[in-house]
Amino acid sequence: MIKFTNGYILDKDFNIVKKDVLVDGNKIIGVGEFDSECETYDLKGNLLMPSFKNAHTHSAMTFARSYADDLPLSEWLNTKIFPMEAKLTGEDIYWLSQLAFLEYLTSGISACFDMYYEPEDVARASVDIGFRTVMCCAVNNFKESVEALENYYNTYNNYNELISYKLGFHAEYTTCVEIMKGIAGLAEKYKAPVFVHSSETKAEVDGCIERYSKTPTELFDSLGLFNYGGAGFHSVWVTDSDLEIYKKRGVWAVLNPASNAKLASGIAPVTKMIKEGVNLAVGTDGPSSNNALDMFREMYLACVLQKLNDNDAAACDPEVILRAATVGSAHCMGLDNCDVIDEGKLADLIVIDLNRPNMQPINDIKKNIVYSGSKENVLMTMINGKILYDNREFIGIDVDTIYKKSKAVIDRIG
């Protein structure tokens, strides 16, 4: 048992309070004041908070970090990314995913929503490190199938406590209606949400309207894909009609501001989403389009780009984005059991160092995290009750081997 003491916590109501937190095994068993004789983690006046959850990424795309930059989405995908991906093996994806997991840990991210291929290798990579991964298939006209998706869904939702699987496909512009109808059938069969890249660029939306006389969101809804909710990754070029569907169906808008800015895709209408009561989550997207896996940068950009977009310095409350990156992302990913600090929840926790220049003076801790916080403030990351990153050092992870193996992949396919 571990007692976190002598500091602040971000409690289940999102208030900053001075309390102890008891962790036994993989669960939080108490929040309050305790005299328990057990191992003590001295917070030294710092903040214990629920970890960030990365609600959209492609972890193994570390292979293309700084390889395919300064291109629009279509050219980036077709001339750079797809040809390189074709060379990857499952073992490559294992090591490249672990490289991403290391970066997530340094950013206080305890779980990722990973849309990629070779799920067995992604799952192995995650379990071997102790990282929590929700996987999502990228079915399209060229890879995978409805049958494979169903097999993955049943296999990896019964694999390991750190692993779960969601229904999904790549995007409207890469997936025919027959496949989408098949996935809608799975959604109905399992009463399950569906997750997809949606409305990322104006060209994507215009093309869908030209093909089907509907926006991507309207098309998905008409096919029954969102009958049980889901998410639109990016959700930049969404219409009022789209947002009505999001609200009606409980669809999450997963914000990826760094990737959308770097690819010049646009700025999601976050203010309107908040006003309409749309569910918000935050993701980094992949390391080949971001290029970092840094939740602090995502939160900052989500806020400040909205102010610029709206020409309103008051737009986008940072606490809303902080909630979206923690609680919102957890709920989007189906991780309701590790969303907040509360008795009975899984112990996915981080410690934020408040004793750094960028956090002083402490006028408003939550605003500091979003507006001035950075990865340098992450002191500790705990997943499922196990500390994997502490005092800015990895615990029990062979980092050198991960670096060596990842470089070997790049050297071979580059």
Image: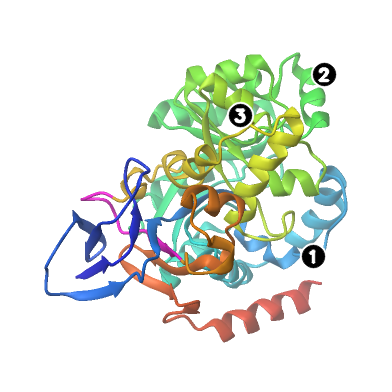
> Where does residue 352 sit, x and y in percent of width and height?
45, 63
Mark 2 near mark 3, Cβ–Cβ under 8 Å? no
| Magenta stretch contains residue 111 | no
Mark 3 near mark 1, Cβ–Cβ under 8 Å? no
Residue 76 versus residue 55: which sits nearer the camera? 55
The quadrant holding residue 330 is top left
Query: Which element is circle 2 on?
Result: helix
Residue range of the region highlighted in magenta in the rendering: 342-352
> Where does residue 78 sit, x and y in percent of width and height?
84, 49
> Where does residue 138 sit, x and y in percent of width and height?
61, 45
Amino acid type indicated by mark 3: Met
Precedes in sequence: disc 3 or disc 1: 1
Judge the density around disc 2: few (<14), some (14-19), many (≥20) Cα neighbours within 10 Å.
Answer: few
Q: Which residue is mark 3?
A: 180
In space, the residues marked 2 and 3 are separated at their CA atoms by 18 Å
Residue at (54, 41) in percent of width and height: 321
Please tell me the numbered disc located at residue 356. Answer: none
Judge the density around disc 1: few (<14), some (14-19), many (≥20) Cα neighbours within 10 Å.
Answer: some
Q: Nearer the viewer, mark 3 or mark 1?
A: 1
In space, the residues marked 2 and 1 are separated at their CA atoms by 34 Å
The correct choice, above or below, for 227 with respect to 106 in the image is: above
Residue 120 versus residue 116: which sits nearer the camera? 116
Residue 317 versus residue 161: which sits nearer the camera? 317
Q: Which residue is mark 1?
A: 66
Q: Quadrant of the N terminus?
A: bottom left
Q: Which residue is mark 2?
A: 210
Precedes in sequence: disc 2 or disc 1: 1
Amino acid type indicated by mark 1: Ser
